[in-house]
Image (cartoon, helix red, strand yellow):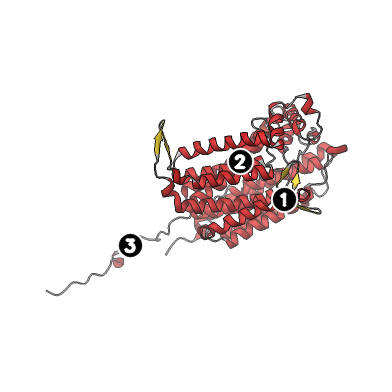
């Protein structure tokens, strides 16, 4: 006999449920605060909004309770709170009284629809993928899917793929989607599956130069191919952010698989060389560098929306917010172009201040930390690499996005996971979270222990020959 799963994990699931309710409560309070600040009254339908959002996340909780009962209880509440706060900030920007080219369309209702789709796919992944190790059987299929998805925007006419200089979209009529967001997950599955099979070969030492063990020349193939694909995305699609994200994830998964720091050093040098070449040859990337280096230059600043104008406005907004912010609904984040997508962190910083920014970053840190903890606790090599890739992919995307808004690095156009407006990003993040939950369930599942110690009756029978 063994201990039932429900008895083993009941406390963890109730903890998760309590945290989900708490996350929804914070979202409702923030939603109410925006209404009071802008219209001096509680928004109509607040109760229904809270109940609907709560029901949505409770469905996700019930799916985890049923299909991944041993999973980490913190993943879902942290993501739910980020998603809920994102909906509130987007709704607050929708309500802003803006005119002219910076006017905002009603994005919050569409973001809520994408949230429903994201939760539905979250549940579907948990139902379909009962064992994450089976994904290893689709290693090269995942690679083919990822390459096709990455190639689609590059092959389409610019009128159906280009937005703000980057050709990363599929746009037909009122529908738009970024295939690269789904390609990111497929690439992580491919990286994990491929490196599980080749890590021993890649871990072999080559030559030692200046105290660093460099790999053998014939083992450079994988990293060289990843570098070339990254450059192809950069040159064809003018997408610095995705190029950095894909190559960074590959380097980290490669390091986790081989435990060789030389791969990180080589990859970093290769990416810097590629970025310098792109900055010198691609006008869109060059403009991003100029905006980063000279955000308040009048010649660049006067180019209207885009360039350094939005970066300068975002920096003004962050400075206005100070430590505790102006309060939800009491600032002017709406004057920043793309305030609900690329610059949503500046909106948070202006109205919630540095304290709010740190709280949001802490939520990301919780998800990433638990993801890495899952990678450490997973017994199979594929699960380790898959969880590490998913967790680091989220961390790198947050770093690149927040770093661009705060002028730590050049702007790249990446969205902030779960928080920014954008259906493709939101859906892909919920799918990635479902995979993390699935790996976490396997990592935290206790060994099947007998309910009682073996007694004398359980001893093996021994046949004694007659004397």
Q: Indicate the position of residue 22 as horizontal and vertical percent values.
A: 66, 46
Mark 2: give few (<14), some (14-19) or many (20+) Cα within 10 Å.
Answer: many
Question: Considering the numbered disc 1 on the image, is that residue within a helix, a strand or a loop?
Answer: helix
Quadrant of the drawing holding the C terminus? bottom left
Residue identified by numbered label 1? 423
Q: Quadrant of residue 64?
A: bottom right
Q: Quadrant of residue 128?
A: bottom right
Specify the label residue 221 is tagged with.
none
Which mark is first along the chain, 1 or 3?
A: 1
Q: Indicate the position of residue 277 as horizontal and vertical percent values.
A: 62, 35
Q: Mark 3 or mark 1: which is in front?
A: 1
Distance Cα–Cα, label 3 vs label 1: 55 Å
Q: What's the residue at 78%, 24% (across, down)?
A: 298
Mark 1: give few (<14), some (14-19) or many (20+) Cα within 10 Å.
Answer: many
Residue identified by numbered label 3? 454
Question: Relative to 44, is 457 above or below?
Answer: below
Q: Mark 3 or mark 2: which is in front?
A: 2
Q: What's the residue at 45%, 60% (across, down)?
A: 3
Residue located farthest toward the left when viewing the structure as drawn: 467
Distance Cα–Cα, label 2 vs label 1: 21 Å
């Amino acid at each position: 006999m063994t201990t039932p799963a429900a008895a083993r994990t009941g406390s963890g699931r109730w903890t998760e449920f309590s945290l989900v309710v708490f996350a929804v409560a914070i979202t409702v309070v923030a939603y109410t605060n925006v209404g009071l600040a802008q219209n001096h009254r509680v928004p109509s339908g607040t109760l229904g909004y809270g109940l609907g959002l709560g029901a949505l996340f409770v469905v996700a909780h019930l799916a985890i309770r049923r299909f991944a009962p041993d999973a980490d209880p913190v993943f879902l509440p942290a993501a739910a709170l980020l998603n809920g706060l994102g909906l509130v900030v987007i709704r607050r920007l929708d309500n802003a009284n803006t005119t002219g080219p910076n006017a905002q369309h009603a994005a919050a209702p569409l973001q809520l629809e994408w949230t429903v789709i994201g939760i539905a796919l979250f549940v579907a992944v948990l139902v379909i993928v009962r064992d994450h190790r089976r994904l290893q059987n689709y290693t090269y299929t995942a690679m083919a899917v990822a390459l096709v998805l990455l190639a689609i925007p590059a092959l389409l006419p610019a009128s159906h793929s280009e937005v703000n200089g980057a050709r990363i979209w599929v746009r037909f009529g009122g529908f738009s989607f970024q295939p690269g967001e789904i390609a990111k997950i497929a690439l992580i599955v491919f990286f994990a599956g491929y490196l599980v099979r080749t890590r021993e070969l890649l871990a072999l030492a080559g030559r030692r130069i200046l105290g660093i063990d460099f790999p053998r020349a014939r083992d450079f193939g994988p990293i060289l191919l990843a570098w070339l694909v990254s450059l192809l995305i950069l040159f064809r699609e003018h997408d610095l952010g995705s190029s950095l994200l894909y190559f960074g994830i590959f380097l980290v998964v490669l390091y986790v698989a081989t435990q060789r720091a030389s791969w990180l050093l080589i990859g970093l040098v290769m990416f810097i060389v590629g970025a310098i070449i792109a900055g010198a040859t691609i006008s869109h990337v060059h403009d991003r560098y100029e905006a980063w280096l000279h955000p308040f230059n009048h010649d660049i600043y006067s180019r209207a929306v885009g360039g350094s104008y939005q970066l300068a406005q975002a920096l003004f907004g962050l400075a206005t917010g100070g430590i505790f912010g102006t309060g939800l609904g009491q600032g002017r984040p709406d004057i920043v172009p793309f305030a609900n997508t690329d610059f949503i962190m500046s909106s948070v910083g202006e109205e919630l201040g540095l304290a709010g920014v740190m709280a949001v970053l802490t939520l990301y840190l919780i998800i990433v930390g638990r993801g890495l903890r899952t990678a450490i606790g997973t017994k199979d090599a594929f699960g380790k690499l898959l969880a590490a890739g998913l967790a680091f992919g989220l961390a790198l995307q947050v770093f690149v996005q927040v770093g661009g808004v705060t002028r730590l690095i050049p702007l790249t156009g990446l969205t902030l996971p779960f928080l920014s407006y954008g259906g493709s990003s939101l859906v892909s993040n919920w799918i990635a979270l479902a995979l993390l939950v699935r790996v976490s369930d396997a990592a935290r599942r206790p060994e099947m222990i007998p309910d009682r110690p073996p007694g004398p009756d359980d001893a093996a029978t021994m046949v004694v020959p007659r004397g």
